[in-house]
Image: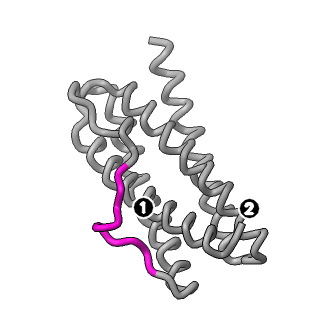
Amino acid sequence: MSDEDVTRLLKEAYSDEIETVMNYLSNAVVLDGVRAEEIKNSLEADVQEELDHARMLAERLKQLDEQPPGSMEFEARQESLQPPEDTTDVPSVIEGVLEAEDDAIETYKQLAKAAEENDDLVTEDIAVTLLTDEEAHRTEFRGFRKEYVQD
């Protein structure tokens, strides 16, 4: 992989993080029901963490003499994470979060590999750090899914 691949993956990850912030915030607000409260609280807490991820990626792009994409370059891709029409459909939100986390994990693995191949230790470190956070989010939401499947 080339330096251009590192830059492309940084920009892709940045856009994904921004989209995740939008969708987590929307879902944290719109979900209804007593059983939704824990999911809403988790999403609300994750909004800031995902925003911090986006900031780290944006700062790395700047260090590489690039800039993060603006809204006109943005292409939404998280169809499964859209707020549900039925605001009590918590399982669909859980599944959407899991899909988004899986996508983020794959992107950060690719970014770590591309950075390693280009001897870019800083970007590799960022990718591994963010990968760790995303895997923790996925584990948390797998637990939520188990609780909902039992009922």
Q: Residue at position x 46%, y 67% from top?
A: 54
Q: Residue at position x 42%, y 35% from top?
A: 96
Look at the picture and state if 82 lies above or below 66.
Answer: above
* The N terminus: image quadrant: bottom right
Amino acid type indicated by mark 1: Ser
Q: How is the image coloured?
A: one colour
Q: Secondary structure at mark 1?
A: helix
Look at the picture and state if 134 lies above or below 121.
Answer: above
Is residue 28 shown left or right of residue 118?
left
Q: Position of residue 80 (x, y in %)?
A: 38, 35
Magenta stretch, main secondary structure class: loop
Q: Quadrant of residue 70?
A: bottom left
Q: Quadrant of residue 86?
A: top left
Residue at the farthest top position: 151
Residue 113's label in the rendered image is 2
Q: Which residue is mark 1?
A: 15
Q: Position of residue 34 (x, y in %)?
A: 28, 27
* The C terminus: image quadrant: top left
Q: What is the span of residues highlighted in magenta in the rendered image?
A: 67-76
Is residue 134 shown left or right of residue 76?
right
Q: Position of residue 92 (x, y in %)?
A: 37, 27
